[in-house]
Image (cartoon, helix red, strand yellow):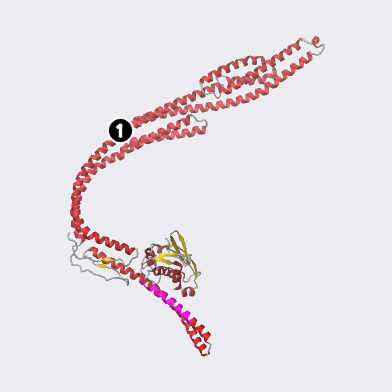
Amino acid sequence: MKADAKPAEIDAAGSGGAGRVVTPSAPAVRFGIAWRLSLAFLGVGALSVVACIVGWLSYARLSDNLASINDVHLPSVALSARLAEQGGAIIATAPVLALARTSEEYEEAKKGLDGRLAAMRVVLGEIAAARPGWLPEANLAVNVDAIARNLASLDAAVRERLALERRNREMVAQLRWLHADLIEEVEPLIEDSRFAIRTMLAAAERPGAAAAAEPQDMERLRQEIRKTEAMTALNAQANLAVGLVNRVATLTTLEDLAQTMHFLSEVADTIEPQLTALATFSDAVTLRQVLRRLIELSSIEGGVPGIRRGEIIAANESRRLLAQNRDLVSSLDGAIAAYVRDANVAAARAADQSAAAIAVGRNVLLAVAAISVLAALLVGVLYVQRNLVSRIVTLAGTARALEAGDLHAPIPLGGQDELADMAHALKRFRDTREELVQAAKLAALGGLAAGVGHELNQPLAAIRSHAHNGRLLIERGRTEEAETAFARIQALTARMADLVAHLKRFARKPDGTSAPVPLRATIDSALALFGSRFADEDVDLSIDVEPDLQVLAEEVRLEQIFVNLISNALDAMRGRPARRLSVGAARMGSEVAIEVSDTGAGIPDEHLAAIFDPFFTTKPVGAGLGLGLSMSYNIARDFGGRLRLGRTGAEGTAFILELKTADA
């Protein structure tokens, strides 16, 4: 296609303001970009329709295969992994249950295993739902049921072992008490018998005692001797029996238990005859009861050995069930592996079908794409690249420059198409924006006119008075006092000149270049324009800004921001009982946050969203253009900073200006 032959005209704004406006003459009927590109894209669009049809057919098949992989095969593998994870958790938790020593350990392990089994059954249900009508999950269910039965048996064995352990502990505690009772009973009896024997022997050794001894005395001596021997033997055998029973309570194998029980039976057999011998002694009744209970605790039927034997058998059964549990989980892993292999085979088959569909669609699309690319190259090289792109790039650069605050960026104005219209619109926007900035400044100056007049009237009145006094002093020959009056006149005129220079500097158009600017001096310059308002309206002023703090900005436009914020603050405090304006600055890394706050009535909630919009104002007609905050917001953004509302309410409003420091 033929590009516009007319060379592009460039309009650049000079230092004094907007540049020359070039208005192209437009034909009545224009064959513009839309028509040109429409014809080109209609051809490419027809090829695209063909490509879409081919792609739709190819990718419909691909979508079916991918859906099969995504909805069936991948979930199957994931569910298998979850099932295997639960099996591994069961292997890890089952020994905890088998080795539990307290009811708390048992309950915690039992709860964990029940949760794992429930999770496995949930996964089995999800597997069945993922592939309805496909039955390999039946093998998985059989394995899970077997694991559940194994865990139930293990639970029963553990519960039996824990019950036997409790009984064992109770009997061992009884044994300790019996041993204590035995010591308390047998030692006094032995000591009494020995005392009686010593007494009778001493009586028999007295002179003439042997001739006077009666036969019953000798029989009584023999009985005491037999009693002492029996109780001494019983004490030794009972202590041995207690030690053997305590050992039985801690044995871990049936072989050791059988050997120890053999010794314990022999000891019990030796105790029985001694108990018969003690039956003739009335003071040994309690001792005989203690020994009878000791023999009961030593028996295999209802004593500690029988309980311990049951414990060992239950522990052996738990170990057997643990081994069986590991085998069952291994079998489940094998079934899971087979299930995963089947899912992988099905997924590989679906992937092969997808690859075939992609290959067919790719070949057809490549052919269509080659034709489309050729047509697009013709359009792109002959028209888009040589004409449209270069102009769009230039306009985009200009727009970015304007956004960054460069109001002197050149704008290409050539051509008779839509881009030319855009260039002219961009130029009008630039000119209008620049004029609005200046209009806002002049409006602010107009609002300050009364205060400035007051600031000038006071020095003028003083100059008139000092001039009159100086003339009189000269007439009277008092020249030194006249020189003092004239020096005061000179100081007052310098003050007026500074004020006028300040107004001229504020009113001129800025150069748009950011440079280090002393923040405190700029704030003081802005406040100087409101000196009379602060005095007339009785407004307290508070400034907390470092004297040597500098920011990156343009001095005149930065002062305009502070003038707008201070003016709005004074307007907001008009008629308020307490009027205080505060200006503070704080460093935040490479930035400075300047807060301008007042004690006005605040901004209503319904106005918060529009305070930075152009031409928005709540002031009476003629009291403002509604451009102050909008222009201040854009100026701050031109500096690379930000102006935002900090807070507002019945206690007042604060705006925060964030700028980069000069040393950033």
Helix, strand or loop under label 1: helix
The question of residue 494 being in magenta is answered with yes
Quadrant into which the N terminus falls? bottom left
Q: Is residue 621 visible?
A: no
Q: Is residue 194 visible?
A: yes
The question of residue 41 being in magenta is answered with no
Q: Position of residue 535 (x, y in %)?
A: 49, 74
Q: Is residue 310 above or below residue 214?
A: below
Quadrant into which the C terminus falls? bottom left
Q: Residue lying at the far right in this picture: please name it.
A: 207
Q: Position of residue 141 (x, y in %)?
A: 36, 31
Image: magenta residue range: 488-509
- Please state which amino acid type lies under the numbered disc 1: Asp
Front one among 169 and 557? 557
Which image quadrant for residue 509? bottom left
Front one among 286 and 499? 499
Provide the major secondary structure of the magenta segment.
helix
Residue linked to disc 1: 342
Front one among 80 and 596? 596
Q: Position of residue 53 (x, y in %)?
A: 20, 47
Q: Position of residue 658 (x, y in %)?
A: 42, 62
The residue at 44%/65% (across/down) is: 550
Front one among 361 and 614? 361
